[in-house]
Image (tube, rainbow, N blue to C red):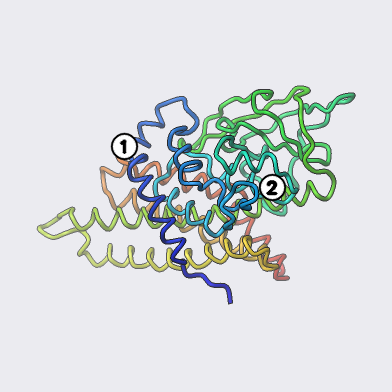
Amino acid sequence: MTELLYSDIEDDLRHAVRSLLDDRAPWPQVLAGTEKDDPADAELWRALAADLGCAGLAVPEELGGAGASFREAAVVLEELGRSVAPVPYLASAVIATAALLDCGETELLTELAAGRRTAALAVPFSAAPGAPVPTTVRVAEGSAGLTGSVRSVADGLAADVLLVPAGGGLYAVDAADAGRTAVTSLDMTRRLCDVDLSSAPARLLATGAAAQRAVAAALTTGAALLASEQLGLAERCLETTVDYLKTRYQFGRPVGSFQALKHRLADLWVSITQARAVARYAAACVSDADPDAAVAVAVAQAHCSAIAVRAAEECVQLHGGIGFTWEHPAHLYLKRAKSASIALGTPDRHRAALAGLVDLPL
């Protein structure tokens, strides 16, 4: 049976990451960052990726990584979900890293593990595991360059390297050789961009079935670990709501003592506990290359997406008037939850995929 409990190493990792985020990414600072043009917090990313070594958790030691697994990376994402910190961890240390691990690329993996460079998979953020990836980029005739465009790439503005599926292969393109246009993103802490390529120089990483497997592994791993981020977000929303209801008084009593609110929070706590189980199982499955990974990922995303949105909505509502203000962080969590719920496949898309995986009629 898969072990779902956190190990001592994972608990230590959680403590280190949370301490860093409490110090470097308190919510007033995260909120202030949404007013800036910077696509990510470069200093925080350097501290998280290089100083703590979180960028290389899933990278083998011989390539400069920690030699751990995506289970440990999932713990980092839980903490990043709690803080909605604007760093490209999911895009670079998870999705891009999974693609590079699958296709056996070593040079770029070493750079990513050290935190010297970041990468992003150039596919729409809505692309779901198992679904055909839109072929909007082609190999330019008479050259190794790439031409075409990709819409709504997550953290593409913060990436140094773009991993681009094109012409049946997977290519690495220096981000400086690509046109990148910021687009309006609902989630202001994870920004999207459109990527335009015009005979951009590219290095072939994999071709044919190997390229398809690399992209599929990246999307599956990304969806699995996105569930952990959603879990962390939901937990933080519940915690802050409970704390607020303990101190907010109405009719001479703490609002949290009202039975109707107790029931709502208790129901949410149960759902989050279930979300923890499915998110942990999905992370374990992709880490161990378990044959049940596709089912585990579909279940995790179908459940955790909805729970994160519900927790964020409850956070806004139960904070009363202050929860609707720009000065309070509740809207950051709601926007991240809503954005993540359509990222890497909607809950409905994952439920449909699950039905096929377990032979249920649609």
Residue found at the very far left of the displayed protein: 252
Q: In the image, which disc is placed on residue 348?
A: none
At label 1, which amino acid type do we have? Pro
Q: Residue at x 40, y 27 (%)?
A: 35
Q: Is residue 187 visible in the rendered structure shown here?
A: no
Residue found at the very far front of the displayed protein: 62
Could you classify mark 1 by the number of other residues whose Cα lies within 10 Å: few (under 14), some (14-19), or many (20 or more)?
Answer: few
User: Horizontally, is 258 left or right of 52 in the view?
Assistant: left
User: Which x, y percent locates residue 163?
Assistant: 69, 37
The residue wearing badge 1 is 28
Q: Earlier in the sequence, mark 1 or mark 2?
A: 1
User: Which x, y percent locates residue 284?
Assistant: 58, 64
Name the residue nearer the viewer: 202 or 54: 54
User: Which x, y percent locates residue 152?
Assistant: 61, 35
Could you classify mark 2 by the number of other residues whose Cα lies within 10 Å: few (under 14), some (14-19), or many (20 or more)?
Answer: many
1 or 2: mark nearer the eye: 2
User: Which x, y percent locates residue 235?
Assistant: 39, 57
Query: What whole-number distance in Å separates the C-alpha atoms at marks 1 and 2?
Result: 35 Å
Name the residue nearer the viewer: 310 or 241: 241
The residue wearing badge 2 is 99
At label 2, which amino acid type do we have? Ala
Name the residue nearer the viewer: 55 or 195: 55
What SS does tag 2 mark? helix
Q: Residue at x 55, y 32 (%)?
A: 158
